[in-house]
Image (cartoon, rainbow, N blue to C red):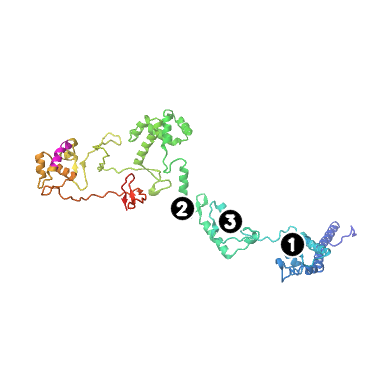
Amino acid sequence: MMYSRNRPLSKGLSPVSAPFILLMTLLMAGVSAGAQAPARDSQAAFASQARPLIEQYCLACHSTEKHKGDLDLERFTSLSLIRKDVKPWQNMVEQLESEEMPPKGKPKPTDAERAKLLGWVKGFLDNEAIARAGDPGYLPLRRLSNAEYDYTIRDLTGVDLQPTKEFPADGAGGEGFTNAAESLADMSPTLLNKYLLSAKEIASHAVLLPDGFAFSLTKTRRDWSNEKVAELRTFYGQFAPADGRLPLGPYLSATIRHRAVLRNAAALDEIAAKEKLSPKYLRILFQTLNDTKPSFPLDLIRAHWRGATEKDTGALAAEIGAWQNQLWKMVPIGSYRDGNLSRQKADDAVVNETQTVRLAIKPKAGESDVVFYLATRELFGGAAAGEVIWSRPRLEGEKKTPLLLKDYPKFGTAYEVDYPAAFADSAKYLAGAIAARTPGASIEQIAKDGGINAARLTRWIDYLGLEPLNKNGGEADPVIKTIAAGPLELLPEKTPKNDQRPAINGWHNKGNDLPAVL
């Protein structure tokens, strides 16, 4: 195209920009023509080339009426319909190239017809690929699957709440996966309501903290408090037993091993670091054990500590622990009931002017005497010493008159037994028991004549089980005495079957040939 430099092509265009605009106009026109021409040519080619061959060789099996293999080629009457579903045409290329279609027994196209149809289908698919370059196609919006939603909430909150446990199950796509976008695109009103309820449920697990918030598996304030207390106990459990008390063993062992060196404050910190102990507690314990101020029971513990060696650590710790149990109460970790803000609370007994002390007398087997010592001591040092008056020490029995200790000389002999003297006259008591069998005999007269005790003679007669003779001087009729039944014991072994003695059938004691016949 020729144009003049000195003459503009049109009003408002400079001579320099005119050629560029003209070139761009021609290029755009060419592109537009090129984009539309194949569409017209393809439509014409489809109507004149592809459609007749498909009707001749394919629609016998793949028509709208028959559609074998779920394939209906009769519905593709225009390119616009083909563009909406190109997948069957991609499969057609594979079937034609492998000559699997038409199947055996059906009319087959010639090589020229096959090449003609393949040429048109491939050309159409190529043009469609170029026209859709960069277009990923239809991308459905999708939601998280149930598993993905559970894992997301777990990662965000730090706890496994599993909010989808009441959700309907996810459907699987054709490829078998439950997270396919096509199968997760639908959101029903019921499922949306499930999401709203799960959001409320998740929010109910939020715990407000001074510096933010956290999430818990529980939903009540009581459970949240218990969780924090459990965390505190776990933390303290690294350094102390479950009750929170300081383990005295390592500290006592360190004070005994380094008794002389610990008097230096600088050395104390160094030894505490070496022994992996708290410098604060080690210093308090060492100062308490070396304090000279009178105190009970610390004076006893200090005396034992000064003479102790490392092997005595366990006994010394047990002694201190026993005093602690008597004098102190340990408040459980995290419990502030009754206004307890300290871990250790003094168990101060109420001071009374009078105190009743009861001791149960339980002699051990083989003991002939039980000894009690009543003693007092000063708990706190001071100028004025206290006094203790023991008021009416006595022996008491159930529903019996108390026996005062001051009156023991009056009643003690009744409870004291001189066994050598008691059994020295055994022959006399046996003779008296025989004499007492005579009809009409008087036990008091027999005891007086023999110089023995009548009450003791009666006990001998009861123990021997002798009955009085009858009027003719013969033995009295036997008297059946009632004896308290003892505990029954199961016989341990079953008698084996014996055909020679079939009557014997039961159980017997081990080592005893006499069975208990059932």
User: Magenta stretch: dominant SS?
Assistant: helix
Mark before the other along the chain sequence, 3 or 1: 1
Residue 65 forms part of the magenta stretch: no
Q: CA distance from mark 1 to mark 2?
A: 63 Å
> Which residues make up the magenta segment?
421-433
Seen in the picture, residue 482 relative to 27 is either above or below; the reply is above
Q: Is residue 169 left or right of residue 313?
A: right
Q: CA distance from mark 3 to mark 2?
A: 27 Å
Quadrant where the image shows the N terminus:
bottom right
Q: Which corner quadrant of the image does residue 117 belong to?
A: bottom right
Tag 2: amino acid? Asp
Q: Residue at x 31, y 47 (%)?
A: 514
Q: Residue at x 11, y 41 (%)?
A: 447
Q: Which residue is mark 3?
A: 147
Q: Residue furthest front?
A: 500
Q: CA distance from mark 3 to mark 1?
A: 36 Å
Residue 91 badge: 1
User: Label 2's element?
Assistant: helix
Mark before the other along the chain sequence, 1 or 2: 1
Tag 3: amino acid? Ala
Q: Position of residue 428 (x, y in %)?
A: 13, 38
Tag 1: amino acid? Asn
| Near-viewer residue (18 or 429) | 429
Q: Is residue 242 left or right of residue 80?
A: left
| Near-viewer residue (457 or 355) | 457
Q: Position of residue 93 (x, y in %)?
A: 77, 61
Q: Which corner quadrant of the image does residue 133 belong to?
A: bottom right
Q: Residue at x 46, y 30 (%)?
A: 267
Residue 223 badge: 2
Residue 423 forms part of the magenta stretch: yes
| Near-viewer residue (472 or 1) | 472
Q: Position of residue 188 (x, y in %)?
A: 59, 65
